[in-house]
Image: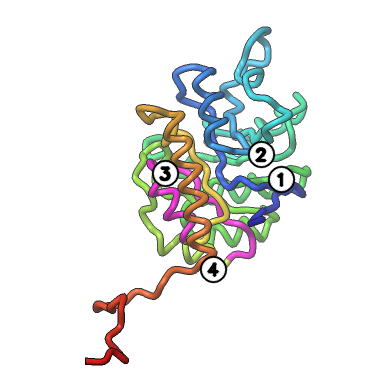
């Protein structure tokens, strides 16, 4: 079955996007990325020290295999996020960026208004912006209106592993925006990823759910399989929910 999706003029088969933080070592990170089957890998620009020679996070990621998705994690204003993206472009990193503008340091909830402002500025400068935002339909519509090719509402607070707290909100966003929806933040285990895909999400972005597992490589495999299973279940169409039982072997037509 061929089931692809497009982003920034590129076609992808994998629907899982994986982060590169919190792993015990670069070797463990590489093994987890491989096990996940991801084609897009996100990296926090603030974690990269371009002034230091030798091995670095970027050196550990095969650029011929993965599309690098730099993100603006740690930015608390629209101007700061735009500045970081401009720096990344000057250093030769692709114009595909994950935009994060944090509004609250405790919950790491996004500043939705500042995110829309930053997205507007970056898109005018030619960036392809993937915005992390709240699970708010109006915010997602505004991000699409300024030119974002996808929206990435949170499932739960970053790194919480709580799973999808508001599936109804996610479903509303999917039904009312005309771009792919990628769940970002809060996925803790494989069942969370499957639920996101069964709702109709185009993909799932995760980091801590894999990196903080007891066995990150095995969890990456589980996440890959869950995303695939959830997508197939969505395409197949689930049975209707019923309030009462319905026998698998109907009695109609049975001869007494």
Disc 3 is placed on an element classified as loop
Task: Name the disc covering residue 97, or none.
Answer: 2
Q: Which-is-in-front pick, marks 1 and 4? A: 4
Segment colored magenta: 177-198
Q: How crowded is mark 2: few (under 14 residues within 10 Å), some or many (20 or more)?
A: many
- Rendered location of residue 177, percent (x, y): 59, 64
Q: Residue 128 carries which label?
A: 1
For the point 61% across and 57% down, the residue is: 180
Q: Earlier in the sequence, mark 2 or mark 1?
A: 2
**Which residue is labeled 4 in the image?**
175
Q: Quadrant of the N terminus?
A: bottom right
Q: Where is residue 24 in the image (x, y as percent from the top left)?
A: 44, 18
Mark 1 and mark 4: span between their CA atoms?
A: 23 Å
Residue receiving disc 3: 187
Name the mark nearer the viewer: 2 or 4.
4
Residue farthest toward the left in the current orientation of the protein: 256
* Mark 1 in CB contact with mark 4 (< 8 angstroms): no
- Judge depth for marks 1 and 3 and give the one in front: 3
Asked whether disc 2 touches disc 1, contact meaning CB atoms under 8 Å apart, the reply is yes
């Amino acid at each position: 079955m061929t089931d692809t999706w497009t982003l920034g003029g590129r076609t992808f088969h994998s629907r899982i996007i994986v982060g590169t933080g919190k792993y015990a070592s670069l070797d463990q990170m590489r093994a987890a990325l491989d096990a996940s089957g991801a084609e897009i890998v996100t990296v926090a620009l603030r974690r990269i020290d371009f002034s230091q020679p030798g091995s670095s996070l970027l050196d550990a990621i095969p650029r011929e295999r993965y599309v690098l998705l730099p993100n603006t994690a740690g930015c608390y204003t629209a101007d700061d996020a735009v500045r970081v993206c401009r720096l990344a472009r000057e250093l030769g990193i692709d114009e595909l960026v994950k935009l994060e503008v944090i509004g609250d340091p405790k919950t790491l909830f996004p500043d939705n208004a500042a995110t829309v402002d930053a997205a507007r500025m970056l898109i005018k400068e030619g960036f392809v912006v993937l915005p992390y935002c709240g699970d708010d339909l109006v915010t997602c519509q505004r991000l699409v209106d300024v030119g974002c090719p996808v929206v990435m509402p949170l499932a739960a607070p970053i790194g919480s592993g709580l799973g999808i707290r508001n599936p109804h909100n996610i479903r509303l966003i999917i039904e009312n925006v005309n771009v792919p929806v990628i769940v970002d933040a809060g996925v803790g285990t494989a069942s969370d990823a499957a639920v996101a895909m069964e709702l109709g999400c185009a993909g799932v972005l995760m980091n801590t759910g894999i990196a903080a597992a007891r066995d990150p490589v095995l969890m990456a495999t589980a996440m890959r399989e869950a995303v695939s299973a959830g997508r197939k279940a969505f395409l197949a169409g689930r049975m209707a929910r019923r309030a009462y039982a319905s026998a698998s072997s109907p009695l109609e037509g049975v001869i007494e």
